[in-house]
Amino acid sequence: MHLSRDHQNVFVLALCQALFMTGQSMMFILAGLVGADLSENKALATLPITVIIVTTALTTIPASLLMKRFGRKIGFMLGATFAIIGGCIASYGIYHSSFWIFVIGTMTIGIHGGFAQYYRFAAADVAKADFKSKAISLVISGGIIAAFLGPALVNYTFDIHVVPFFGSFVSIVILASLAILILGLINIPRPSFTERSSSGRPLRKIIQQPELIGAVFVGMIGYGMMSLLMTATPLAMVAHGYMVHDASFVIQWHLVAMFGPAFFTGSLINRYGVMKVLMSGTLLLFLAITAALAGETVTHFWASLFALGLGWNFTFIGASYLLTETYQSEERAKVQALNDFMVFGFVALCSLTSGTLFHFYDWQTINQVAIPVIATASITIIVMIWRRDKLA
């Protein structure tokens, strides 16, 4: 059966998203535990995760500008190459029990994230208008594979070698290598000369749009609070006497909740509007906090992380779609770069804050800190809804 260009791109990018998120899920499950094992200062346990996100944030701007000049295929392949290099360095650090070499490895892997975050926009940018929200949603749905493959690889590889966790990071190298092969099938034309040479309106004018500000802000909060809580979850569960496979189980279902709804989130946006989807997302984030504060059994951790994943899905996909309505084609590189830099810069801050709060306080405190932040996102959405109704 012949696929249209839109559907072919979505299929290829969803597979690449699956491979990328499989590696990410493995790192989110293991990197904090490896950090705690290798570092003498346990407050730095989540630093290997934080540097992934920091590097991702710092890479978003040069990655977007590079792909504007040379095209999505070359950019995505380059990003996956950095994952291969980083996986080799991280594996070397684990083998030689060097915390800082391991950190350098995860930091290099983070460069891949700076490119891979554009998978969702790559599909939307060349899709027909009525397929745009579905393109973003379906590409992100590739992560549902990671929900099962990532934890399964963790369970199979974390003790496969005499040095714990070594095999897991070797498998990340293999995942990135497969992504490079699959990316050869992508069908996104290189930007035209006009698009490469024109940048459209000045950025200072574009960012004056209230809905662009709202899209960036809600995206920051949704992804940031997810990072804050998810990063600390394996540490909190191990601290409460649970095993690695218990944490892996909880993270697995968190990933199912993150990516499973993406099969229909785009349709929900088309049917009910992006604002209702965004508001539903923040309500689910509140539900995650409620479950976490209710108790510390495996069931409570599971319920909290499941609701957290759903909330991330609605806020991130909704905010990504809303952003695409605020720029013209020649402006996409700088607007997408600004968005992802802001989002992942905040995610990095939340990740680092998570480890510090857990070291000096506890799991309950981390959840309490998230409440006013999520409330601010909800108020922002309400203001956007009020403004739309006023202009209608």
Image: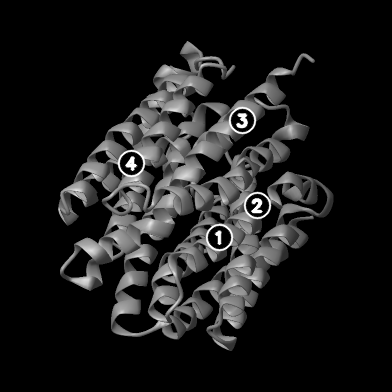
Tell me the CA gap for discs 4 and 1: 26 Å
| Quarter in which the C terminus is drawn | bottom right
Q: Is residue 237 left or right of residue 137?
A: left
Say which element carries label 4.
helix
Question: Mark 3: which amino acid?
Answer: Ala
Task: Let me know if residue 157 appears in the view.
Answer: yes
Query: For residue 382, what is the image quadrant?
Result: bottom right
Tell me the CA gap for discs 2 and 3: 15 Å
Counting residues from the N terminus, which is met first, the one under dot 2 or under dot 4? 4
**Residue at numbered disc 4:** 109
Residue situated in front as seen by the camera: 219 or 194: 219
Residue situated in front as seen by the camera: 383 or 288: 288
Give the label, 2 or 4, closer to the camera: 4
x, y percentage for residue 23?
A: 44, 44
Counting residues from the N terminus, which is met first, the one under dot 1 or under dot 3? 3
x, y percentage for residue 202?
A: 43, 37
Residue situated in front as seen by the camera: 258 or 370: 258
**Residue at numbered disc 2:** 318
Q: Is residue 103 above or below residue 189?
A: below
CB atoms at circles 1 and 2 under 8 Å apart?
yes
Tell me the CA gap for discs 3 and 4: 23 Å
Say which element carries label 3.
helix
x, y percentage for residue 248?
A: 50, 61
Tell me the CA gap for discs 1 and 3: 22 Å
Task: Find residue 218 and name its label.
Answer: 1
**Residue at numbered disc 3:** 123
